[in-house]
Image (tube, rainbow, N blue to C red):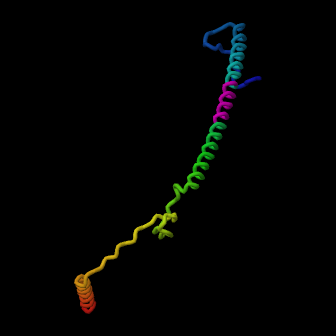
Amino acid sequence: MEWPFLVTTSPEPIDGQPTSSSCRGMAKKTTMQVDEGFAGDLGKLLRHAQNKAESWLGQRKAIAEHLTNLRDTANSLLSQLGVGEARRPGRPREPIADDGSSSVAFTRERKTFTMSAEARAKISAAQKARWAKQKRAAAK
């Protein structure tokens, strides 16, 4: 195979030393042989690099596929166990039953507080005072 871009056709000597006309032809021939050998070695190297790259890409795809299958299997097993379910936004639902059969955690009922009549009277007086102040400000 000819590699025209690697063939040296100049009659000048390779090392810059003046040579006789008979040596010039030998230099051309030797340079051409070296260039063809270099081109062949370069071709082998590039083919080898391409094969390695394709091999690595194939291995990468196989590993990614294996990891995807592994993740899917783990997710399905976790969902069967009921672990890792996504929390829903908003206020939690009320429990369906107190016997533990509900999927929602049991929440304790809030204790009711009773307010004394004295406390209710103080709150009422304070609110009436706020309303009176608001009424006076609106009248001005």
Q: How many marks?
A: 0
Instruction: Describe residue 112's horizontal placement relative to residue 24 as left or right.
Output: left
x%, y% of residue 42? 67, 24
Q: Residue furthest bottom?
A: 139
Question: Residue 81 appears at what percent x and percent y?
Answer: 55, 54
In the image, taking residue 123 as reference, residue 20 lies left or right, namely: right
Which percent across, then down, holds residue 88?
A: 50, 64
Side of 91 where 128 appears, left or right: left
Q: Which one is in front, 11 or 14?
A: 14
Position of 80 relative to 4 (above/below): below
Q: What span is colored magenta in the figure?
A: 44-56
- Camera-nearest residue between 19 and 57: 57
Report the predominant secondary structure element of the magenta stretch: helix
Any magenta on residue 111?
A: no
Quarter of the picture containing the N terminus is top right
User: Residue at horizontal 69%, vertical 24%?
Assistant: 44
- Front-most of residues 28 and 58: 58
Does the magenta run of residues contain 49?
A: yes
Residue 69, horizontal then vertical, whole percent:
63, 46
